[in-house]
Amino acid sequence: MDTLREIRRSALLAAWFMVLTFPIMVIRVNTITNTIEWRWERLILISVGSFVGSLVWNYFQRRKRAQGGPRPQTADLPADLPADLPAELPATDIGSAPLTPPVEQRTWVDRGLARVGMSRATFRKPAVAVPLIVAALGVAIAYPLVTSLYQTNIMVSALIYVMLALGLNIVIGLGGMLHLGYAAFYAVGAYTYALLNHYFDVGFWVALPIGAAVSMLFGILLAIPVLRLRGDYLAIVTLGFAEIVRIVLTNWSSLTLGPSGIRSINRPTFFGLSLSLSQSINLTYFIALGLVIITIFVVYRLENSRIGRQLVAMGEDDIAARAMGVDTVRAKLTAFALGAVWAGLAGVLFASRTTFINPESFRVWESVLILSMVVLGGMGSIPGVILGALLLILLPEYLRPLSQYRLLVFGALLVIMMVFKPAGLIPKRRRLYRLQPEEIPVPDAGGDS
Amino acid sequence: MILDARGVSMDFGGLRAVDRVDITINEGEIVALIGPNGAGKTTFFNCVTGMYVPTEGTVTIQPPSGSVQDITGLKPNRIAERGLARTFQNIRLFPNMTVLENVMIGRDCRLRSGVFGAIFRDPRTRAEEEQVIHDSYTILRKIGIDRYVNDLAKNLPYGAQRRLEIARALATEPFLLLLDEPAAGMNPQETRSLDELILRLRSEEGLTVFLIEHDMSLVMRLSERIYVMDYGKLIAHGAPQEIKNDPVVIKAYLGEDVSA
Ligand SMILES: Nc1ncnc2c1ncn2[C@@H]1O[C@H](COP(=O)(O)OP(=O)(O)OP(=O)(O)O)[C@@H](O)[C@H]1O
Ligand SMILES: [Mg+2]
């Protein structure tokens, strides 16, 4: 019955599309001969295309509904759980039983893993994790040696965006603050290095921490006026801030050389050795890789710490967090400052890689792109954000053969993703705490009511 | 006297939601604040806990082993640090955090570690984190919701969510607990076990409890003193029996003159 209705709906939709697109797709006025051309074959294409498209769409929607139906209570676990799990976790068994994620936290990742007899916990076992990490590192290190310079270059830019996305993730993914001006800090980092290099001949390695520090300073400067703002208001102010930074960079020509930008910025050096261009690009790749690894490490630690917890609580309910004694002012400042640090580092690296920067590199589009990476990947989820960044940078590169339709395909993919995976590719899951049996206090009088 | 609110008023534009209210609370008491809808009870709580800065009046506290402090106009987190913890009328948990994490947030103002501790995980930070987990779990057991430890707060049954709010408030180590309609939406059985919990908190934790409640039987069972508000003003104050028979209170609730 359902299928019949879907077919009817799709047919209606196809008819509607034919009407809608008729004037532009079918009729063409030939202005030279002053005749009208009727391109009927296009009408057929549209009707078939929209009909099939609608059917596919409906199919996926139905599947999604079937999966996302009302979740069972914690006590009755769904059928797709591995059989060896206890049906219910008795309170006192927390230490001994392997903790399964509570049902509602299971995402498609968990379901997929369960199907092949694994879970996220599998990857936390050293026997699995260590070889995996070593293999990933091996691939990452071998990458520039086995691929072309062109590929390495693309990867450097992808890695820079991974840093940026992870940094923004601190503000948006953890703190829940809609920050639309992130590119401003990226610009601050890049210009810090470019200017120091241009005027004082400061090298990359010295500029790296300076860029991070200056960017952090700007992060705090922005955070102070926006402390009271949330949601849309915060988004508007941060957006405005980013534009101010860009406009200042464009117009303060005596210092920044204005729209024509700063040229011949030095590439990273390696203990004073003189490097060929390809060596230099490989070096940049390894620096980017190193910084990304440090970023992942730090963000991971932050997330699983007091400050990470404060930020998440603040993002969930600012007022409740404050009432419970969380110093939200401090937490917000910290989030903005930390986020800015990564943007600063990425900026310095960016300037040294391209050797030329101008304010056009730091348009609002840049902030939006970084934001999309975080949202697409899964807010707050480190693997998700990394995947999001890699996809958004690499996909357009490899879609180049589609040249003129590249952005169209890209946009369509994004929309489809967000409809079917609104929590992102790899959704964030809250951390579960293992309580050791000896940690569990002996129930005293009235311990359990 | 561990809480002393004097002449507290709160204006919203032209509306005076709280009008020169004087309330005092002594150590170890259970005191109730009642009144019809919109009387200004929640607003008064908000003035005491720093959510609002009162337009007029002062709020001072004296912790059981401390000196008198003026807390008027302090930030909510500073007031929580000083030992006043509250729950919310419309439950305000952190819905997408686990139950344990919700309580851990309550512990937050007692923690010291900062960003560098988080990154380098020095022994002190690690010990602190372990302690927080342990303490939070202990509180969950005490409140009787430890079986939900790793569930997301939003998936808890309603009664358990109310209890989790109390657990989270307890985690801040308060000496005065302010409960805003803790029994709202609970069934009679849940309400009875809430009674028991509140009494136990007083006897075992030495807490003083100040609660807003519409459930009169709960108020009558638990509280030693009752304050009654109507249209922002205090209209009566006394022991439960006095309040029950006070014509002014009856009139406020029924909206008509009963003396006739
Ligand atoms: N932030 C605010 N801005 C404007 N008016 C407010 C605000 N908060 C409360 N009020 C008004 O103040 C009055 C008192 O509200 P309050 O919430 O304190 O009542 P209450 O006694 O807690 O009622 P209830 O029993 O329904 O919870 C109401 O008229 C309400 O509309
Ligand atoms: Mg109220």
Image (spheres, coloured by chain):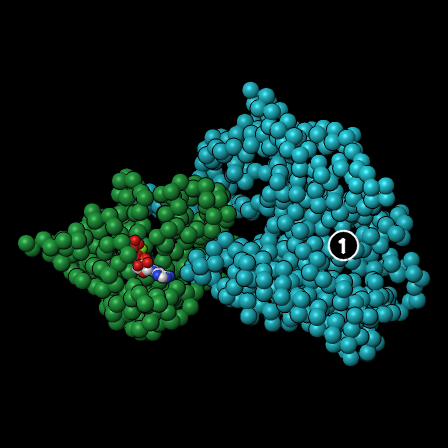
Chain colours: A cyan, B green
Image coordinates for residue A345, horizontal then vertical, percent: 73, 64
**Host chain of mark 1:** A
Residue at 63% from the left image edge and 55% from the top image edge: A169
Q: Is residue A86 visible?
A: no
> Which residue, as the protein is rendered here, is positioned at the far top?
A1
Q: State whether residue A176 is above or below residue A421.
A: below
Q: Residue at x 71, y 58 (%)?
A: A366
Q: For residue A431, say whether it is visible.
A: yes
Which residue is label 1 attached to? A159
User: Which residue is the extreme one toward the front?
Assistant: A34
Q: Is residue B163 left or right of residue A227?
A: left
Closer to us: B157 or A301: B157
> Residue drawn 70% across and 42% down?
A412
Asked which quadrant contains residue A11, the reply is: top right
Q: Quadrant of ligand 2?
A: bottom left
- Is the CB atom of the residue marked by disc 1 within 8 angstroms of ligand 1's nearest atom? no
Percent coordinates x, y for residue B180 in the rendering? 32, 54
Task: Please give the name of the residue rendered at 82% of the width and 70% of the height, measured from the top-left corner.
Answer: A260
**Number of residues whose C-alpha sits closer than 10 Å to that of mark 1, classed few (under 14), some (14–19) or many (20 or more):** many
- What SS does tag 1 mark? helix
x then y, percent, for residue A392:
73, 49
Judging depth in this view, the residue of A316 and A146 nearest the camera is: A316
Position of residue A193 in the picture relative to residue B68 (left or right): right
Q: Amino acid at mark 1?
A: Leu
The N terminus of chain B lies in quadrant: bottom left
* Quadrant of the image containing the C terminus of chain B: bottom left
Horizontally, is A432 left or right of B218 in the view? right
Q: How far from the left and from the top, in percent, is residue A61?
A: 60, 32
